[in-house]
Amino acid sequence: MNDLVSMKDLTEVDIIELLDRAQNFQVYGARELPRKYTVSNLFFEPSTRTKVSFEVAERKLGIDVVPFEAGFSSSVKGETLYDTVKTLEAIGIDALVIRHPDVGYYKELIGKTKVSIINGGDGSGQHPTQSLLDLYTIREEFGGFEGLNIVIAGDIAHSRVARSNADALTKLGANVTFLCPKEWAGEFEAVHEWDEEILASDVIMLLRVQHERHNDKMSFTKESYHKQYGLTKERKKMMKENAIIMHPAPFNRGVEIDEELVECSKSRIFKQMENGVYVRMAVLELILNGRN
């Protein structure tokens, strides 16, 4: 595997291999790669978890990390992403982790550069490493995916996490239901009330309301959205005993999730963040070792 840009590109075997590699890192700790590689993280959108966990993963593997700040790069002078990537290729970068607001930005890069591309999120398109860390967290909890009932609730139309996870979870045998306001379903079929979904769910995966991707004002106040579509304390009481709560973060407390539930016993939100380092180490190891 030379690149990772979409969960659609991974087979079930590929996914399980990456999860197993991540588990080895969790159990046995970090190991440096057999030779030195140089990686840069190009983030053209804000990020905390993805950017920092990639940097931690890179350093644990003994990778040389070259800093890149989009706001101080030649992109502000009009340089295209393609030319930026070709420049970094010429300088000697082995791989790039890229987050970019344009959906499918990587299509102009794959096959046209020797640099390996890892998609750190493209607009409302795909976010493969987030999906992999979510899958890792679910497998850690349940041992597998077949027959699990998973509700993904929130701003579905604008969510790269929803798209990536729907592709992967369905491929692995889980039952995925989307829950959101009608105007936020996008191309997906969705339910619009919790009803029996809360009773049947093994995993409730909440999504942030992405105000920055809405062209018009929300038709909900924070309070009304929380009441109709958020995970409230009352709904949490209706969940299965072994059901878990997930969220890719950042989260809006009191909007998609009640303040008190962020760190409750069912929450795996911060565990997801921890698992993100193992998963990103696995992705980097597989891709970089494949360059030999």
Image (cartoon, rainbow, N blue to C red):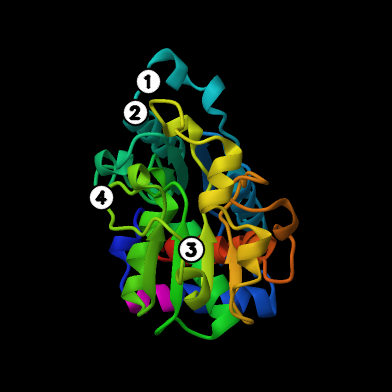
Magenta stretch contains residue 13: yes
Report whether residue 266 is seen: yes
- Contact, CB < 8 Å: mark 1 with mark 2? yes
Residue 187: give its label.
Answer: 4
- Give the left or right position of residue 12, taking residue 196 as reference: left
Q: Where's residue 287, x and y in %?
A: 43, 62
Task: Name the residue that disc number 3 marks.
Answer: 283
Report whether residue 44 is seen: no
- Give the left or right position of residue 100, taking residue 105 as reference: right
- Mark closer to the chain start, 3 or 1: 1
Q: Which amino acid does label 2 sit on?
A: Asp
Residue at (54, 74) in percent of width and height: 138
Q: Label 4, label 2: how many angstroms apart (C-alpha)?
A: 33 Å
Q: What residue type is labelled 1?
A: Glu
Q: Residues within 10 Å of mark 1 (few under 14, many from 20)?
A: few
Q: Where's residue 96, x and y in %?
A: 46, 45
Residue 83: give its label.
Answer: 2
- Mark closer to the chain start, 1 or 4: 1
Relative height, residue 86 to residue 185 (above, below): above
Residue 28: give its label.
Answer: none
Q: Which amino acid does label 4 sit on?
A: Glu
